[in-house]
Image: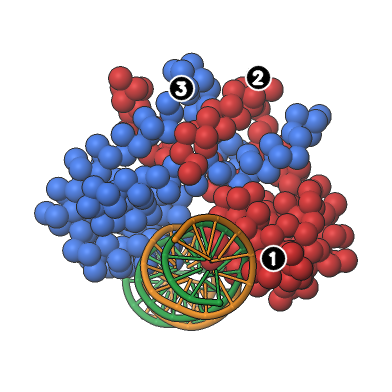
Chain colours: A blue, B red, C orange, D green
Amino acid sequence: MLNNQFKRGELYSFITGKASTAIARRLQKNFKEAGIDVTIEQWSVLYHLWKQEGQSQQQLCEGTFRDKPSITRLVDNLEKSKLVKRVASKNDRRSNLIFLTKEGKTLEQKTMEVANRTLNEALEGVNNGQIEIAKEVLQIVYDNLAR
Amino acid sequence: MLNNQFKRGELYSFITGKASTAIARRLQKNFKEAGIDVTIEQWSVLYHLWKQEGQSQQQLCEGTFRDKPSITRLVDNLEKSKLVKRVASKNDRRSNLIFLTKEGKTLEQKTMEVANRTLNEALEGVNNGQIEIAKEVLQIVYDNLAR
DNA sequence: AACATATAGTTGTTTATGCAACTATACAAA
DNA sequence: TTTGTATAGTTGCATAAACAACTATATGTT
C-alpha cells in the first residue's frame, strides 16, 4: 500500500504545499522589491496573455486552473491597474477577449527576470535530474486530480 | 545557468503550484463528501494539535507556516466550530494555549483516512523512488526560502 | 419559430492570506 | 523603578478562492 510510504509529517507537508507557498511569497517579495506592483495571481493571468493575447476569460480559467469568478475578479483588478482591457467578442457576444495594454506588455520582461531569479533561489542545491523528476511527479499529480 | 532548464510553461507551473492546488481542492471535496465540515486550512491547524495539544498560537504559526493574523482567525473559526478552545497561559499572560475539544479529537481518525485516500489518488502511477525525490526537492525549496 | 439546454460571464457570501498598525505583557539595562 | 525593547496576539484593509445563484447569449431539437 502506498499509505505506508507516508509518515505523518511528510503527508502533511506534501498536501499543504509549503514549498509552493514559500515560492509564491518569495516571488511576491521580489516583485515588491523590484517596484513591480502586481500580485502573483494577477501575474499568472498576465503570463498566459503574454503567451497569447486576446484569450477569453474561459480560456484563462483553463490555463490558470482557476474558476470563473476568480478570473472575473482578477481581470477586474488588472483592468483597474490599467494592465489589460476587456473587448467584447464579435463572434460571440457572451464572451470577453482580454488584451494587454502597453503597460501590461512592458511588464513581461521585468517580471520574467524576477521570476527566473526567484526560481534559481528556490532550486539552489537541487540538481537537474532531481528537478526533472519533481516536475514529472507534480505533473502526474495534476493529471490525476484536475477535472 | 539553471535558467536554461526552465522553458516558460514549466517555470510557470512550478511556481504557481497547480499540483498542490489540485490536491487541496480534491481533499476539500473528499472531506465534504465524507460529511466533514472543516476547511483544509483549519485541518492543517488541527493536524498540528493532534501531534501535540496545548501549543501556543506562535508555535502554530511556525508549524503551519502561517503568519500571526492567519492563526488568530483560524483559531477564531475553529473555536466557533467548537473544535478547539483557547486557554490563557499561566506562565506568560500574553500567550494562548490551544486545546482540542472532544469533538476536535474525534475528527482525527476520520480526516486522516480521507487524507490518506486523497494522497493515494494523487500519487497513482508514481513510483516510490520518484516520490522520495519529489519530497526531497520540495524540502530543499522550502529550506531555501522559508524565513 | 419555440423551447430546452449549454456556455460565458457576474455577483454575493464565507473563508483565508499578506501587510501594517495596534494592545498587552515580558524582559533587560540604566 | 524607569525606560526601552522584544514578544504574543488582535484588528483593519485589500486581494483572492470556493461555491451557489444569477443574467445574457448561443445552440440544438422539434
Q: Position of residue B138 (x, y in %)?
A: 55, 33
Q: Residues within 10 Å of mark 2 (few under 14, many from 20)?
A: few
Residue A105, percent from left and from top:
16, 49
> x, y (%) of residue A21?
50, 47
Report how many numbered discs are placed on residues in the image. Answer: 3
Q: Quadrant of the N terminus of chain B?
A: top left
Q: To which quarter of the image does residue A18 belong?
A: top right
Q: Secondary structure at mark 3?
A: loop
Q: Position of residue B20 (x, y in %)?
A: 55, 44
Among the two numbered marks 1 and 2 on one chain, the one whose residue lies closer to the N terminus: 1
Q: Residues within 10 Å of mark 3 (few under 14, many from 20)?
A: few
Q: Left of A49 or right of it: where is C16?
A: right
Residue sitting farthest toward the left: A102
Amino acid type of the residue tagged 1 in the rendering: Asp
Distance from the alpha carbon under mark 1 to that under mark 2: 46 Å
Q: For marks 2 and 3, give the CA distance.
A: 19 Å
The answer to whether mark 1 and mark 2 are in CB contact below 8 A is no
Q: Which residue is mark 3?
A: A125
| D1 horizontally vs A30: left or right | right
Q: Is residue A53 visible from the viewing direction of this image?
A: no
**Label 2's element?**
helix
